Image (cartoon, helix red, strand yellow):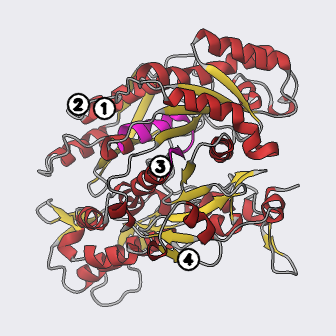
Amino acid sequence: MKDIDIARSVEKVKITDITKKLNIDEEYIEQYGKYKAKISNEIFKKLENKKNGKLVLVTSINPTPLGEGKTTIAIGLADGLNRIKKNAILALREPSLGPVFGIKGGATGGGYAQIVPMEDINLHFTGDIHAITSANNLLSAMIDNHIFQGNELKIKKVIWKRCVDLNDRKLRKIKVGLSNENGMTERDDGFDISVASEIMAIFCLATDLKDLKRRIGNIIIGYNEDDKPVFAKDLKAEGAMTVLLKDAFNPNIVQTLEKTPAIVHGGPFANIAHGCNSIIATKLAMKLGDYAVTEAGFGADLGAEKFLDIKCRKAGLTPDAVVCVATIKALKYHGGQDIKDIEKEDLQYLEIGIENLLKHVDNLKEKYGLNVVVAINRYLQDTENEIKLLEEKLKEKGVELSLAEVWAKGGEGAIDLAEKVVKLCEKNNNFTFMYEDEDSIEEKIRKVATKVYGAEDIEISEEAKKELEEIRNLGIDISKYPVCIAKTQYSLSDNPKNLLCKDPFKIHVREIILKNGAEFIVAITGNIFTMPGLPKVPAAENIDIDENGNIVGIF
């Protein structure tokens, strides 16, 4: 049975039944139909003195074309915790239309570990990403209108890009202002995908509406004739942009197939953005539940690193336990086994591929000082020999293995994992960041590259050096800004084809960008793009609507 069929076969309860279970008063709820709602941020005043629950982060190895099921495990884990009588709540990201119609598909879990209504969540949901897109493009419109109307601010160079929540590589570089209207100025421009926009980053890092508006005002849109920065607040744009985001800024609540509450809010990519749901959603889950299960995008080198070094640093959070997800098939793929033979037992390839998992485990356990358990998303083809080898390798590192069968069994398939997570949460950890606030930007990038990725060093292009020097000359205090490294998700290196990373490698930084509203520095490495493209056969080709009005083809 397909995921969408399973989702439809399980009866949902009204979202008000979910919120009543959480003791959320009706005054804090705005319903979007029967099964979706927003929770007003006013609820934080009521919950101010309530003790925070435990925070559990779900991350993974470097992803493969086979899929590792990180979100599926996160959902199954939350259901599993509730099955062992723990009050658990999910805090996940909102899916982007880019991967839904592209190569990755939806992001609502799979099998009997899903959040619902899956079609709504994967498509327009409550309109949050549309609001982010509109706020972003309103700023673009105000910039170009200001220039057209006389350019009082003497804007000479515009660096602010438009955005759209679709994979469209043709929009990476464009020209605008081609209508030949009197006073119209032609210039080069481009689009980012909405989930990689600075607005999305700000949306997910802001602590309240006031902070949201402040950060939006601090966005640098370009430079004037004196090479001084021009801010969004100089255009008086921050008020209207915040208005567009006001309702979106309230977290969304839905449910799993097992009626576990799921807060789904914000959705930056982890390869080209910081990869975590909103701070307010995570904090709300921690206030409402005894255990808050959240995930960070792609592998631990990207999502978990940014969760820990950016989100936790900004929000004052510390995970109580980390789950690192893998599959036997994906480990063999990392070991070099041909994908057409991936279901055949081959301990040689598995042993080589396990090194990728062990690197992530070592980073989380030894370098970040966190309590870690490995969850294997189990398939029928996994053999006892393969599982035994993996268990032995992890035992050498002092890390437990849990075999999760959440796709087929839902929360029941995660009871062992849930019990191990509860035990981990009772242990003390020695959480530390990968770099210090006071480190230089170069040193922050170098520490992530050498410690987390395993690179021998970094190589910064002359253009990136020039950009960093220009940033330092702006007169803006960036001394405590973290770094957000844009890197391929497929490898620990910046080369997506270098899966084994056996030979020494460097991380090549080609561009450095100040995101002053988000309050971090972006370092773009390798050939990564902030506007993805569609694959040869996009998922959109298989998405349709049948004669009964039902959506088909989303997976």
Q: How crowded is mark 1: few (under 14 residues within 10 Å), some or many (20 or more)?
A: some
Residue that badge 3 annotates: 276
- Mark earlier in primary sequence (3, 1): 3
What residue is at 64 percent from the left and 46 percent from the top?
Answer: 82
- Residue 293 lies in the magenta-colored region: yes
What residue is at 22 percent from the left and 33 percent from the top?
Answer: 440
* Above-or-below relation of 489 to 452: below
Report if the CB atoms under discs 4 and 1 are less than 8 Å apart: no
**Distance in Å between CA atoms under marks 1 and 2:** 6 Å
Residue 552 rendering spot, x and y as whole percentages? 81, 68
Quadrant of the image containing the N terminus: bottom right
Quadrant of the image containing the C terminus: bottom right
| Amino acid bearing label 3 | Cys
* Above-or-below relation of 496 to 107: above
**Distance in Å between CA atoms under marks 2 and 3:** 23 Å
The region drawn magenta spans: 289-310
- Mark earlier in primary sequence (2, 3): 3
| Amino acid bearing label 4 | Gln
Helix, strand or loop at disc 4? strand
What residue is at 76 percent from the left and 46 percent from the top?
Answer: 410
Residue that badge 1 annotates: 444
Residue that badge 2 annotates: 439
Q: Give the number of the mark in front: 4 or 2.
A: 4
Looking at the image, residue 530 sits to the left or right of residue 214; the answer is right
**Distance in Å between CA atoms under marks 4 and 3:** 25 Å
What residue is at 67 percent from the left and 47 percent from the top?
Answer: 79
Q: Which of 493 and 321 is in front in this view?
A: 321
Residue 191 rendering spot, x and y as whole percentages? 46, 64
Pick out the residue farthest to the bottom.
Answer: 182
Residue 317 rendering spot, x and y as whole percentages? 37, 41
